[in-house]
Image (spheres, rainbow, N blue to C red):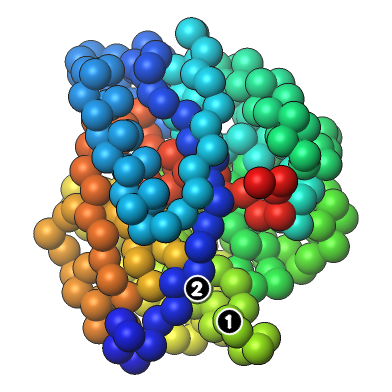
Amino acid sequence: MSSQDRIQQRRRYLMCRPDHFTVSYEINPWMHRAHPTDTSRAVRQWQALHDTYVGLGHQVELIDPIPGLHDMVYTANSGLVIDGVALGSRFSVSQRRGEERPFREWFAAHGLDVVEPVATQEGEGDLMLVGETILAGYGFRSQLNSHAEVARVFGLEVVSLRLVDPVYYHLDTALCVLDPVQGPGGVERANIAYLPSAFDERGRADLVERFPDAIRVPASVPATLEMNAISDGRNVVLSPHPNSFVAQLRERGYHPVPVDVSELHLGGGGVKCCTLELRGARP
């Protein structure tokens, strides 16, 4: 399939400027307090990502950053929004629990029906909508028992996938939804790319069965966050890295759009982590 055949679908995203970004604690393998961070550089890179979305025709909403909440920039972890319903997140780590209330208040103020979660799950970090199915990661941050709650809230099938490599502690670090919704006329176009090594044997088997045409990306040494990417059905915004994933995307007719967010990698997040999709929210 050529890039002319891929259909871009306009998106609405929620982002947060990293005005207070720094690494003052370690809650994932990417974070090292001994490594200095440059907040101004993080802001410049974030702005380039924001401007890339706008330039591609997407709408970007902003939530105000709050001093002391260094990881608010990773808005994908704040919840899951489908058809105007926002299921908030419940963080597994104490350092991020202060983000829960501000995001839920933003959702409510912008016309979303907010559901407060009972079980621990970290939003789109571990919950990814593919067509009419939610792929749900667990093993490091989100709890397996949260998946029943997610299914109940949205009335959709939830497929549980166990993550086994702590470097890929969230699902969105190891899996990218390339065609996230149905195409015109209800034609199913859902497709994904993923790192098989990040999943247990059962998860790998489930992904092969459900997505036989998926892009399977070999693990990189050292590890990268390029799989933490955003696709609108044609354009795939991702962190630049010299490996085969970009070539695989081009072979499938996608248009890779590299954006350097390497400073934000120091907190364990990339392009997708900085981007929460607002499905059905009030304009």
Question: In the displayed structure, does residue 38 sit left or right of residue 98?
Answer: left
Circle 1: element type:
loop
Q: Mark 2 points at which residue?
A: 179
For this orientation, the residue located farthest to the top is 67
Q: In this view, does 128 lie above or below 32?
A: below
Amino acid type, label 2 = Asp
For the question of whether residue 217 can be seen, the reply is: yes
Q: In which quarter of the image is residue 2?
A: bottom left
Q: Which of 30 and 200 is in front in this view?
A: 30
* Distance between the alpha carbons at the discs numbered 2 and 1: 8 Å
Which percent across, then down, holds residue 182?
A: 62, 78
At a point 37% along the width and 41% down the height, the residue shown is 50
Q: Name the residue under label 1.
A: 183
Task: Tell me which corner region of the image, top left, top right, bottom left or bottom right, holds residue 174.
Answer: bottom left
**Which of the two discs, 2 and 1, sits closer to the camera?**
1
- Residue 21 x/y as whole percent: 37, 18
